[in-house]
Amino acid sequence: MKKSEKPLVVDDLTARIKDAKSVTVVDYQGLATKNLGELRAKIKDVGGIFLVAKNTLVKLALKKSKVKVESKIDKGLTGPTAVVFAMEDEIGPLQVLGQAQKENDLPKLKFGIFDAEILDGEKLLALSRLPAKNILFGQLVGSIAGPAYSLVATLQANMQNLVFVLQSAAQNTSKSKQISANKSE
């Protein structure tokens, strides 16, 4: 890479970091070219971007985008580095990375940035195991709506019982009237 191109790459990385909902930095060393291509495609399918970048340029972009560079980041920016930007769903690309790591033990998660908080590889792996956002929303709605449905069913059952009792009382009253009418004849 020419020296004149480096500021452009830093500016591009900085813009992507600012626009992304989350950023994950991985070590892709040892991943076959075929697997790397498949990983890129899967990440793209869930609204992410997978970029291989030089560590110094990533560090400059992080500083430029006002991310507090800590020792976690310094330790993580060694060796081959790829940056995954989550543009739509914060967890979607991370789930793809977690699945790939589960299958191949690669790529290795170095660190990530979620809501301006820096997370290490273990926390990222735990996040990657979460269900998708729409599934979590469905579970939340189900847990909120469940008691309401139970209440409605209970109230309906009580209403049905009340109607049954009233119908029985009405039938008994009409039978009593018929019996008294028959006795008076």
Image: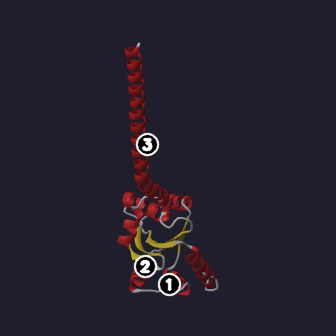
Tell which circle, 1 or 3, labels the residue nearer the N-terminal end.
1
Vertically, is 101 above or below 148? below
The answer to whether the residues at label 1 and label 3 have Cβ atoms under 8 Å apart is no
Q: Residue at x 52, y 62 (%)?
A: 43
Can you tell which mark lies on residue 67?
A: 1
Helix, strand or loop at label 3? It is helix
Residue on which the image places disc 3: 156
The span from disc 2 to disc 3 (Cα, nearest Å) is 52 Å
Q: Left or right: where does residue 99 sit relative to residue 22?
A: left
Report the colour scheme. Answer: secondary structure
Residue at the limit of the structure toward the left, as seen here: 122
Q: Quick one: label 1, few (<14), some, or many (20+) residues within 10 Å?
A: some
Q: Position of residue 170 (x, y in %)?
A: 42, 29
Tell which circle, 2 or 3, labels the residue nearer the N-terminal end.
2
Vertically, is 183 above or below 137? above
Specify the amino acid type for callout 1.
Val
Helix, strand or loop at label 2? It is strand
Q: Position of residue 133 (x, y in %)?
A: 48, 60
The answer to whether the residues at label 2 and label 3 have Cβ atoms under 8 Å apart is no
Residue at the limit of the structure toward the top, as seen here: 185
Residue on which the image places disc 2: 118
Q: Residue at x 46, y 56 (%)?
A: 141
Specify the amino acid type for callout 3.
Gln
Q: Residue at x 38, y 57 (%)?
A: 103
Q: Quadrant of residue 18?
A: bottom right
Q: Position of residue 1 (x, y in %)?
A: 59, 80
